Amino acid sequence: MHQRKEKGERSSQNPVEAVLNLLPVLETADYQYAGNVMNMICEGLNENKDSKVLNGIVDYYITADSHRIIDILVRSKEPHDKHLFDKILDLMKNENYRYKAVQLLMNLVYRQPPWLHKIATHRILNLLINLLKNDQNAPTLMCGLLTLTSLLSIIPGQFIPFLNDTFEIFTRIASWGGKKPGKYKCN
């Protein structure tokens, strides 16, 4: 009965609202039901090539810290890979969302979606490297370092232009041992 109602609601709403209204249902303890909802969200995302649905899904991840969202994002297809990198890039530029954005990127890299190799040609990798060279927030740096070291093994051939920057980052982190405690923020 409940599923019929959702399908009826879906048809009366615009597709973006229909998908975004399903997101809170993912947090149910019923894994089978959550799986069905996840499939519906994935279908809605992949049918709609606009970035609004994907941006809403990422915003939901940022506010709810839902790891089921990562399962949805990993299953996304073109052109959403570019939209996803763009959205994470925008969030990384904002200091208030930086840690969550880098954490999301780390989780995506860990899951290794088929389109992950495209990160090497996107501006997000340059921003991540710049962030690791300059940021002072320890949790953000640790997530960023895990992301960077994972990418080294996932896309080694495409990582060659970033090797000098990577060594600079590791040198910076290694120099922490000689710094006075308390210089770096830990949220």
Image: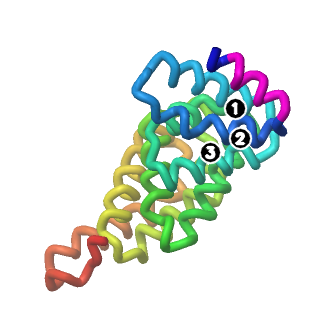
Please say if the residues under marks 2 and 1 sit with CB atoms less than 8 Å apart: yes
The amino acid at mark 1 is: Lys
Relative to 148, is 155 on the left or the right? Answer: right
For this rendering, which residue is in front, 118 or 111?
Answer: 111
Q: Looking at the image, which residue sits at the far front?
A: 1
User: Which stretch appears magenta?
Assistant: 4-12
Q: Is residue 167 magenta?
A: no
Question: Which residue is painted at 63% across and 64% down in the image?
Answer: 90
What is the C-alpha distance between the residues marked 1 and 3?
Answer: 14 Å
- In the picture of the structure, the residue carrying the numbered disc 1 is 77
For this rendering, which residue is in front, 55 or 144?
Answer: 55
Numbered disc 1: secondary structure: loop
The amino acid at mark 2 is: His
Relative to 156, is 138 on the left or the right? Answer: left
- In the picture of the structure, the residue carrying the numbered disc 2 is 80
For this rendering, which residue is in front, 116 or 168?
Answer: 116
Disc 3: CA contacts within 10 A as few (<14), some (14-19) or many (>=20)? many
Question: Which residue is painted at 67% across and 50% down in the image?
Answer: 55
Question: Which residue is painted at 54% across and 33% down in the image?
Answer: 25
Question: Which residue is painted at 63% across and 43% down in the image?
Answer: 118
Disc 1: CA contacts within 10 A as few (<14), some (14-19) or many (>=20)? some
Give residue 2's position: percent from left, percent from top.
62, 20
- In the picture of the structure, the residue carrying the numbered disc 3 is 57
Q: Is residue 7 magenta?
A: yes
